[in-house]
Image: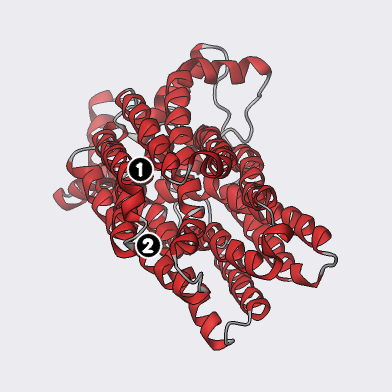
Amino acid sequence: MTYDPENAMADARVDAPVETGKENEAMQTTVKESTLVYDNSPDPSRRDSYRPTKLQSNLTIVSCYIANFSDGFQNSLANPTNVIFKKLLGTDGYPSEMQTRISNSLLIGAILGVLALGYTSDMISRRAGLLFTSGLVAIGTLMSTLALQVHPTHNMLWYFVIVRGIAGFGVGGEYPPSAAAGIEESDDFKRKYRGPVFVSFTTLMATSAAPIQMIVYLICLIASNENLPVTFHAIYSIATILPVIIMVLRFFMTDSTLFHYSNFKRQKRPLKFYLLLLKRYKWRLFTTSLAFFLYDFINFPNSIMSSTIINSLVKDHNIRTTAIWQVILGALPVPGVIVGAWLTNAIGRRYTGILGFAGYMVLGFIIGGTFPHLSKNMPAFVVLYGLLQALGHMGPGATIGLISTESFPTAMRGMGYSVATAFGRTGAAVGTQCFTPLQERAGKQSTFYLAGGVAILGMIVYWFLPESSELNLEEEDRELSVFLAENGFPMEKA
């Protein structure tokens, strides 16, 4: 039997399956819709083999919403705690130095948590990091609830410093994996709206938690007939429930598609590897960290010192009246965050931050210059103070976390964000350490002058930040993979 090439080719054409127009169109559509085509991804047949279900993705986003609300609730507990301890212990029993230590314990714990979980969430798993931090917040807050049972007073205050530090480690550790997981899920399904979605589950939730926490505090005050120990136990018990709910939700979530295909889990990581990452991203790391430091330096102390300022302005120092004004003051920044979320797409992340810092500068100087008159008119003071906070939350408050998350590729997003956030929390700790003695020596108006001056520096730094809305997260991952391969560190795949 002789072999005839022409007949063989003809038989092959007859036996080959014929692609219909619809099948061809479907294949093209599939290729277009695929959002994960990496040069270093697994073989093409496996590129879409991993994708979280819609339920898992939604659980990730929902848990981020609740977790950031819980973190905002934790941070705002400083206000009623300061008022309660002042009333129960007096000025001698609760000096300003101890007040600052308690405020800073949450911050220092947060700094350590941010750095630790930023690294582990990149090297191990977003989900594992989030489960760990939720558990730590629950334990630390539960231990805080028992603080009033510790005697004598000196021991009780130091016990409270330690347990708030534990909760702070969990709160801080929450930020990197939560921000990274949230932005990756947002980009996967709603790329165009990833900025507003990110702001809604981070800054908006944390900001909304402050007035809601004060409402809970006010309800507890009224229900207990201003029994301060009962009120203290109630608000910290509620704060314990939130992270427990989050833990349950996170048992059912999974890591994002972006993280699954671009991570350092199996990567060889000698010192040279980290130096290469630093070399490539040093400018983004420096500018985001400095912007975070400046914003938290003025925002965090201004927020937690507001109860002290308002309490000093209330004529009879009535605790319920102080709480009502705190609720109003806490609610005013919320519209600012909503406007900021819209502006992130309308004018860009960078210009939104500059606009917010500019408003902070103007109002900081206005409040500082008119403070002697404003202190005699509580409604006017609260409105201007609230507007100051609203502009801060609209600008850098809404955008600095977003820019810090978008500016780094998936495989090191947690680490990049954690370094920037750690500098931010350091700024908050330094600011808290400075603001209390500054108020005592130069008057309450001095802190507003300082805030206005720092806002000018913030505007300058923001000018040098990347416009992260223009960054393609998948393209950033590809460029990192090529860069590492060119320098002898090809990315190892799971």
- Circles 2 and 1: CB atoms closer than 8 Å: no
In x, y percent, where is residue 157? 75, 58
In x, y percent, where is residue 488? 57, 13
The answer to whether residue 376 shows anywhere in this view is yes
The residue closer to the viewer here, 355 or 194, is 355
**Given this view, does label 2 or label 1 mark the residue nearer the observer?**
1
Residue density around tag 2, few if under 14, some if 14–19, many if 20 or more, within 10 Å? many
Q: Which residue is mark 1?
A: 368
Determine which of the numbered discs, if any, sits on residue 47 in the image: none
Eyeballing the image, is 387 above or below 314? above
SS assignment at label 2: helix
SS assignment at label 1: helix
Q: Based on the displayed image, in which of its 4 quarters is residue 383 positioned?
A: bottom left
Residue at the left extreme, as displayed:
21
The residue closer to the viewer here, 229 or 490, is 229
Eyeballing the image, is 221 above or below 72? below
Q: Based on the displayed image, in which of its 4 quarters is residue 6 positioned?
A: top left
The residue closer to the viewer here, 151 or 357, is 151
The answer to whether residue 42 shows anywhere in this view is no
Going 24% across and 38% down the picture, which residue do you hit?
A: 355
Task: State how far apart marks 2 and 1 are (Cα).
Answer: 17 Å
Sequence order check: which comes first, mark 2 or mark 1? Answer: 2
Locate the C terminus by quadrant.
top right
Q: Tag 1: residue type?
A: Gly
Position of residue 320 in the picture relative to residue 89 (left or right): left
The residue closer to the viewer here, 106 or 33, is 106
Q: Which residue is mark 2?
A: 329
Position of residue 163 in the picture relative to residue 152 (left or right): left
Going 48% across and 19% down the picture, which residue do you hit?
A: 282
Q: Based on the displayed image, in which of its 4 quarters is residue 119 positioned?
A: top right
Residue density around tag 1, few if under 14, some if 14–19, many if 20 or more, within 10 Å? many
